[in-house]
Amino acid sequence: MDVFAKNTLRKSEWGFAALLYFLSWGWMIFLQDPLWDDWILLNSSSAELLSEPDPRMPIYALMGLFPNPVLVYHLATFLCYFGAGILFIQILQRIQSFPRGYEFPALLLFWLLPLNVARIACINFPYALSLLLFLAGFRLWINPAKGVHKIWASMLFLLSFMTPSFLVLFYAAAWALTFQNPSNLARIRKEAAYTLFLCSVPIIAWLIRANYFQPQGVYAEYYALSLEKIGAAPWLSLKVLAKNFLQGVSFFVNPYISGFTILLLGTFFTLRHFGVLPNILPPSESDKPSWKGIGIGLVLLLAGVFPYVAIGKEPGFSDWLSRHQLLMSPGLSILIISLRSLMSARWFRGMLLLVLSGSLSLNFFFAWEWKNDTTRREEIAAQIRQASIPDSVCTVILHFPEENGLARNRHLRFYEITGIMHQKNPLSPMAYFPKPPGIPENLDTYRNSRYFMEGYHAELCDSFDLEIR
């Protein structure tokens, strides 16, 4: 088998997968309101952004130069995940142990799995870019040995590590790509010096970040590690994966989601019956996935979750926790494909179509949630404007019901609602604090124009409690 086999996907398969990807995630391009930390990001000048000790700040500063930055952010994020899927498949096509003919379902899974819906926030764009750079680095690394490829691969890896979670995934992916293929061991020995250098790149990236890009202010402890957390992280990572699986399955209690999934599943089977749907599995069973792929997929999945769990950032589907699902798609895609080793073609095809139908349904559901989120924020702002708030008040505590009507039942941050209110009255000294989460600690840290609180002085005025319906 040729390790560097050429593209095995037909144009019809690429086209069908791209169509489903657009249907799954293209909606985010058309939602043009800032969300969550976007309000701080878009309210910061280039000079303020570049003054922050964070390697992502030049990207934010560059994106802010465009006339409609929200549109540019959303489109760029959409394209990054699109490109990441293409690179992911190109990598699989060049791995000897990955069976030929399964690239098409792997691509569908990578693009459609309903993970990281937090990608809709502009501020999360660098994470999508890191994923693209990381996969591009591996794509070059596994090319036939060429000096220029080695240089570019090292640079791309180094840039991708501006998102520190990729440091752990690098070693897990390097193990999966090399030591699982006996033919690669000879290449590793031949290129021992370069392999040793490449394996040191994550350490170099970590030292650069620790010395020159250490978070400050409210984010000073964001990447804090401890031996206790690291020791508990492997077991907690398994629990988090199980919890994410159960959360994902629980969505289908909703009759609309389950009903739409059944409709999509029936549509896929009908299209397949009439030959419109490309064959989702190869016609021959001679090149069947190995059960070892289940272990590889699980290792990559754990490596994608471990760095977040180790710093107390648990991936999930509620609020903005899905941003910690960034690295789950590659491992989960390989794991699902490798289940073919335990199933007949008929059962696996049915399971795969069910997963894809469910993923599409959830992505449509997320799109509907975010559309309603826009309407809900307008309703909240209208309730605040209609309230009889005395002139002596500059601190408004907003009491939200348990089901607040926002997407993913997310908490509205104070700078988000204060930014919305300041659009109509930018000179207002008033600040709005949703409860939950309530007034943040160290409030003086936020008393500046970036958080819409430059003229806010709580000690000089009254507070007011407002129930949000």
Image (tube, helix red, strand yellow):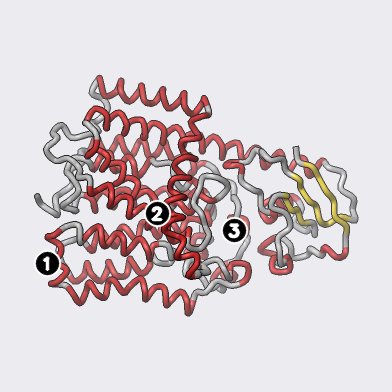
Residue 162 is labelled as: none
In the image, 410 versus 74, the foreground residue is: 410
Residue 151 sits above or below residue 406 on the image: below
Residue 342, picture quadrant: top left
All told, the count of numbered labels is 3
Dot 2: few (<14), some (14–19), or many (≥20) neighbours within 10 Å? Answer: many
Residue 194 sits above or below residue 324 on the image: below
Horizontal and vertical percent for residue 435? 73, 49
Which amino acid, by three-letter code, is at mark 3?
Leu
Which amino acid, by three-letter code, is at mark 2?
Leu
Q: Are marks 2 and 3 in contact (CB under 8 Å)?
A: no
In the image, 284 versus 274, the foreground residue is: 284
User: Element at badge 3?
Assistant: helix
**Mark 3 = which residue?**
42
User: Element at badge 2?
Assistant: loop
Taking the spot 14% from the left edge, 71% from the top edge, the residue there is 189
**Mark 2 = which residue?**
327
**Mark 1 = which residue?**
186
